[in-house]
Image (cartoon, helix red, strand yellow):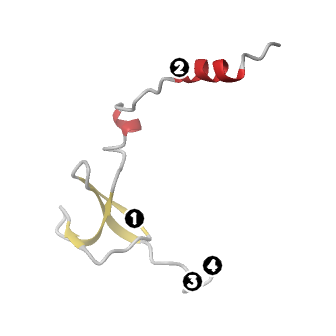
């Protein structure tokens, strides 16, 4: 690989504001804000709106759409295709 063209890759803490959950991982993202982690070290912290802890798909709180009503509305409007 070419030198000095890739961003630095290091430990970063991501903080999910919706669920008040933090996790430490490695990333190329950086931030001016820092946080002291459980191991006593200070890492940059990146605030995110949603993560696997608060996302409806992962938490099982996803809403089911009324797809049957939509199909019936479509068929009523455009007619049912006969094959």
Q: Is residue 3 above or below residue 25?
A: below
In which image quadrant can residue 52 be found? top left
Q: Are marks 3 and 4 in contact (CB under 8 Å)?
A: yes
Look at mark 3 in the image and give the residue it sits on: 5
- Comparing marks 2 and 3, which lies closer to the viewer? 2
As drawn, the label of residue 26 is 1
Q: Nearer the viewer, residue 11 or 58?
A: 58
**Distance in Å between CA atoms under marks 1 and 2:** 45 Å
Q: Do labels 4 and 1 touch, CB within 8 Å?
A: no
| Circle nearer the viewer, 4 or 1 | 1
Residue drawn at (16%, 68%) of the image: 40
Q: Is residue 54 above or below residue 42?
A: above
Mark 4, Cα crowd under 10 Å, few <14 / some 14-19 / many 20+, is: few
Left or right, 79 with respect to 71, comes to right
Label 3's element?
loop
Cα distance between the residues tagged 2 and 3: 53 Å
Alpha-carbon span between mark 4 and mark 1:
20 Å
Which residue is at the far right? 83
The quarter of the displayed image where residue 4 is located: bottom right
């Amino acid at each position: 690989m070419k030198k000095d063209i890739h961003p630095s890759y290091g430990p970063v803490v991501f903080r999910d504001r919706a669920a008040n959950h933090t996790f430490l991982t490695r990333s190329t993202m950086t931030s001016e804000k820092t946080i002291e982690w459980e191991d006593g070290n200070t890492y940059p912290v990146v605030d995110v709106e949603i993560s696997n802890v608060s996302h409806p798909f992962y938490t099982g709180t996803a809403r089911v759409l009324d797809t049957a009503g939509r199909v019936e509305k479509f068929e009523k409007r455009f007619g049912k295709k006969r094959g």
